[in-house]
Structure formats: structure tokens, C-alpha cells
Image (tube, coloured by chain):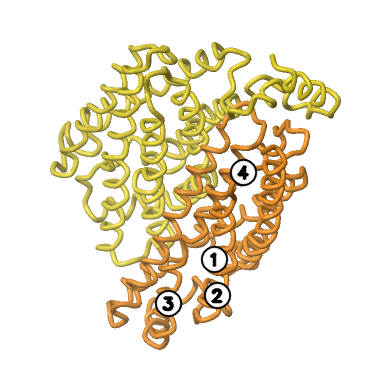
Amino acid sequence: MTGTSTAAARRLRATKVPVLTKTRNLDQWICWWSIPIFYSVFGLVFVYLTRLMPPPSPGHTTEQIISFIQLNATHLQIGIVVLSLSLGLASLSSGIIVVQMRRMQGVSPALAYAYLAALAVAALPGCLFCGFMFALAAFRPDRDPRLIVLLYDMGLLSFVGSLGCFVVQYMVFAIAIFLDEREIFPKWLGYMSIWGVVTELLAIPIWIFRSGPYAWNGLISFYLGTIIFVVWEFCLVVCLYKAIKAQPIDESLQGDDSLAIAR
Amino acid sequence: MNTTDQRICLWLVPAFGALLLLAFCIFPGFFPPLSPTLSAEEVAAFYRNHVGQIRASMIICNVCGVAFIPFFMVIVVQMQRMANPSRAFAYSYLSAAASGATLFALANLAWLIAAFRPERDPQLTMMLNDLAWMAFITPVGFILAQNLCLALGIYLDARPHPVFPRWVGHFNLATALLMTPGAFALMFMTGPLAWDGALAFWLRIGTYALYLGVMFFVVRAAINRQASEEGAAA
């Protein structure tokens, strides 16, 4: 330790250090907690409130679609309000993953930034756009029935069928894990992320089929993809937990030596 | 370190802010805000009668609406200077700022598309109008995430001379809280929570305008401190 940084440490000890900073990696833990909280809210919104998961059938008649909207209108609206308030939590999960990806060795930050950018794009087409479409339908269920059907299709197709952002997310994550010489994440998480890419590809046929296993509510396109996603997300949360726990105490990411001591 | 780039991004706020204020004043549906209880015919008539003003206002918004992004990225740069354990909040803030900007762009498109053919079937014009207002007023989640990350970053900043003073953290949380009613405009046709209501419209927009104004000076002060600290160190 150099003389200047000892002086900096003394200066820091003399200053009142905020109580919050006494917990190591508190910022990462806050972001980490945002993931289970966000997915609990997400489940509440899509499974219980809006009943959009599992998705209602693409084979519904106009009457069935209208009665789905009319019977669910209030639930849809409450659910989408909760979604529009909480979707920002998804940004916090990107934040922590980028931090961990940047700790990797033998990998440039390009992959971490690609992960962040892909998910920043995904928020609208992959989630909130669907919310808007159903909010529009539930706001005026007495719209022209053809418009209600159009909103229903736009909502569910964008929700289940926005594939590219997530393909990029899984792909860059897998590549980073495979190239990382430091084993921040175990290699098997990389293989699981490849499965994530596969599930996105398995959803391609929803753009063509209106019934059967490849429809937007089908056994392969929806259920298999969702199960793999849930398992992946669970493993990611566990691996993130271990990665933060294993982070050496003196590791500085902010790159400011005189302040690293404060931690 | 040279802070010229940050100062340029900073001064984009008053420049584009003035243009957006102009666009806001030109738009014929803000004073008072267009009611969600209007019939399809009335909405269609609004677009037919004010097509020029709507286009002028929304073309300005189209060009300038995302112009605060460079300013938010200055905040990201300042957050990276904070003595936080990691850059987690800075990256989260960046992600939320980018996602949030897409929503304003969506609202803007819906307004302009509705005004493109005002003779369209009124049902279709009303739906585009609904989409524009909802995308404009309701998605507050990303602003909440931005302000929450910034506030937490400020609270965790262990520098002897923090990048931002503590009160900026409180200010960000208070702003976030005052903007939450906007989300409820998805479900109310009338009252203070409808998209033309006092809470969902005026409180939300007034708070955000005030927020940007205050943050302009806060960020300017932070850049000045950075310049003097790093100038002294060099």
C-alpha cells in the first residue's frame, strides 16, 4: 500500500461513512433481490391478474375474444398498471449481470454491453407493448370487434413472438461464460443459456400456426419454452448469488484505488 | 480530465427542453388535456380540426423527444464516479433510461399516425389516440427505476466529498413517488387519475419538468466539482 492511499484511508475513517455502505456489495444485493421480486410481480401480473399466461388460444372466435376481454377487463387493467409500475425492476437485473460479466477475464466488455442493450430493447416489444394492447382493449371493450381481435393478436404475438432480443441476450451470455477464464459463472450455465436460444427458436412457428403444439399457447412453443426459461432464471439467480458471495473483498470495479478502501 | 463533452450534453437539456416546451404549448390537446370520455366522432373531429398544430407539435417531439438521453448518460458517468461497491446502479440506470425513451417514441408515432389521415374511420383514430395517451402518461416504471438507482447510488456513495449531495437522493425518490399516479391512467376514464386528470397529467408532467430543471443545476455542479478535483489532482 502506498503512502497516499494510507492517507486516503485515514481521511476516510475520519469522515462519517454512511451506515449503508457497511454491508459489502450492498448495491449488487439490492439488484439481486430485484430479480425474485420482479418475477414474483411478473407472475402475479401475467398468471393471476391478466390471465395472459398461459395464453388464451389463438383459435378463439371473435365472440370468445370479446368475452375474454370483457370478463377480465378490471383484472387486465390492474395487472397492466402493476406491470407499468414495476417493469423498471428488469433494468436492475441487467445492471448486476453486466457487473458480473465485466469481472470475467479474457472477455471484453462488448458482450456485457450487448447483454444490456439487448434487454433494454426487449422491454417494449417483449413485454410492455403486449400490456398496452390489452390495456387498449380493456379500456373500451365496446370497440369495433375487429379492433379487439387485432389488439388481442398484437398483444399476444408480440409477447410470445418477440424473439431476437432474447436470442441475443442468451447468446452473448453463453459466449461470455464459455470464454471467461475466471469461471465467474459455471460452464453449465452457458450450456443452459444455449437452451434459452433454442426455446426462442422453438417459438418461431407461432407466427404461422393457430393451433397445436406450435401455436402461441402450444405445448412446445409456449410450455416447453416457459419451463426452460423458469429453470434458467432460477439457476441464474443461484449462480449470481454465488458469484457475488465469491467476489474478493478488495476487488475494485470503480477503478478508484483511494476509495476501494472504504468498502 | 476534460469535461467539455459532459457540458455539451448538459446544455442540450435547456436547448431541447425549450423546443419541447414549445411543442407542448402548440399541441391543441393539452390545454386542457383531451378527455378520455370523448366519443370516437369527437376524437376524429379533434384531429380533423387541428391537423396542422398536431403535426407541428409532434414533429418537434419526434425530433427532440429523445434528446435528454445524452443528459441521462452524463448522470451515468457521474454515477460511475461514485464510491459505490460496483457500477451496478449506473448500468441499471443506463438500461432504464434507454428502455424509457422507446415509450415516448411510441406515443409520438401514434399521435403522428392518427394525424396522417384524419379522415380515417373514427374508431381507428380513437384507438391510435388512446395508444398515444397511454404510452405518453402511463409507463412510469422506467423513470421510477432510474430515480431509484440514482438515489441508492447517492446513499451508498462513500466518497469524502460525494458526487451528489444527499438531498438529491431524497429529491429523486420524492419525484418518483409523485409520478406513480400516472400509471393508473390505464384504467380510469374520469377523475384525477384519468389521463387528463390533475394527478396523472399535471402532477406528472409538472413534476418531471421541475425535476429536469433541478437536475440540470445539480449535474452542472457535479461536473464542476469533477473538473476542480481532477484539475487539482493533475
Q: Colour of chain B?
A: orange
Of marks 2 and 4, which one's residue comes earlier in the chain?
Answer: 2
Are there few (<14), some (14-19), or many (20+) residues within 10 Å of tag 1? many
Are there few (<14), some (14-19), or many (20+) residues within 10 Å of tag 2? some
Q: What is the CA distance from the residue labelled 2 to the residue labelled 4?
A: 36 Å
Element type at marker 4? Answer: helix
Say above or below: A169 vs B191: above
Q: Which residue is mark 2?
A: B33
Identify the amino acid type marked 1. Answer: Trp
Q: Which residue is mark 3?
A: B39
Element type at marker 2? Answer: loop
- Residue B222 in percent (x, y) is at 69, 49
Q: What is the CA distance from the residue labelled 3 to the residue labelled 1?
A: 15 Å
Q: What is the CA distance from the residue labelled 4 to the residue labelled 1?
A: 34 Å
Label 2–label 4 contact, CB within 8 A: no
- Residue B87 in percent (x, y) is at 56, 32
Identify the amino acid type marked 2. Answer: Pro
Whether discs 1 and 2 lie on one chain: the answer is yes
Q: Which residue is mark 1?
A: B195
Say above or below: A98 vs A133: above
Nearer to us: label 3 or label 1: 1
Identify the amino acid type marked 4. Answer: Gln
| Residue at 45% over, 36% down | A48
Residue closer to the observer: A243 or B31: A243
Q: Which residue is mark 4?
A: B78
Q: What is the CA distance from the residue labelled 4 to the residue labelled 3?
A: 48 Å
Whether discs 2 and 4 lie on one chain: the answer is yes
